[in-house]
Amino acid sequence: VQLVESGGGLVQPGGSLRLSCAASGTIFMIYGMGWYRQVPGKQRELVAGITSGGTTNYADSVLGRFTISRDNAKNTVILQMNSLKPEDRAVYYCNADIMTVTTGRRLYWGQGTQVAVSS
C-alpha cells in the first residue's frame, strides 16, 4: 500500500491550496483518513480527520478555514485549505487506516508535502 500526496506549494497569506492523497495497492477497506502537519522542532499534530462514514473533526486552529473530504471510490482524501496564514506553514502528511488481505489492518503514512505561506 502507498499513500501519495500532491498539491503543496507556496501561497500568499489569505490564499488557498488543495492537498490530495491517493491510496493504492491491494486494499480491502479504508477506515479513517486524516491530515497531520509538522514543523521543525515540534510534534506532528492532527489537522483534520474523516471517518469512513464521512464524520469529520478539525484542529481548533483550522476550523472554518480547512475542509477535509474523501472519495471512497478513488481511495482519496482531500484537504481544502482556505484563508491560509503564515502559521499554517508545515510539512503536511496524510494517513489512512487500511486493511489489506495480506497484511491485515494498520496505519499508513504518506511521504509529506510542503506548504509555505509567505508574502
Image (cartoon, rainbow, N blue to C red):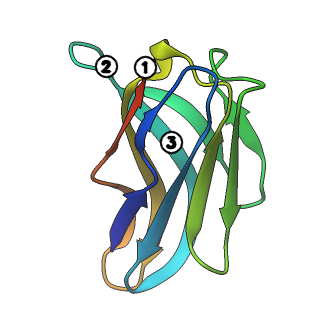
What's under tag 2, amino acid-wise? Answer: Gln
What is the quadrant of residue 23 in the picture? bottom left
**Mark 3 Cα within 10 Å, few/some/many (few <14, many 20+)?**
many
Query: Would residue 57 appear left or right of 21 to someone viewing this image?
Result: right
Residue 35 - label:
3
Mark 2 vs 1, N-terminal side: 2
In three-dimensional space, the C-alpha distance between marks 3 and 1, rounded to whole angstroms, equals: 21 Å
Residue 118 - label:
1
| Helix, strand or loop at mark 2 | loop
What is the quadrant of residue 36 in the picture? top left
Q: Viewer-proximal residue, 87 or 61?
A: 87
**Mark 2 Cα within 10 Å, few/some/many (few <14, many 20+)?**
few
**Quarter the N terminus occupies:** bottom left
Mark 3 vs 1, N-terminal side: 3
Mark 2 vs 3, N-terminal side: 3
Residue 102 vertical position relative to residue 115 in the rendered view, above or below: below
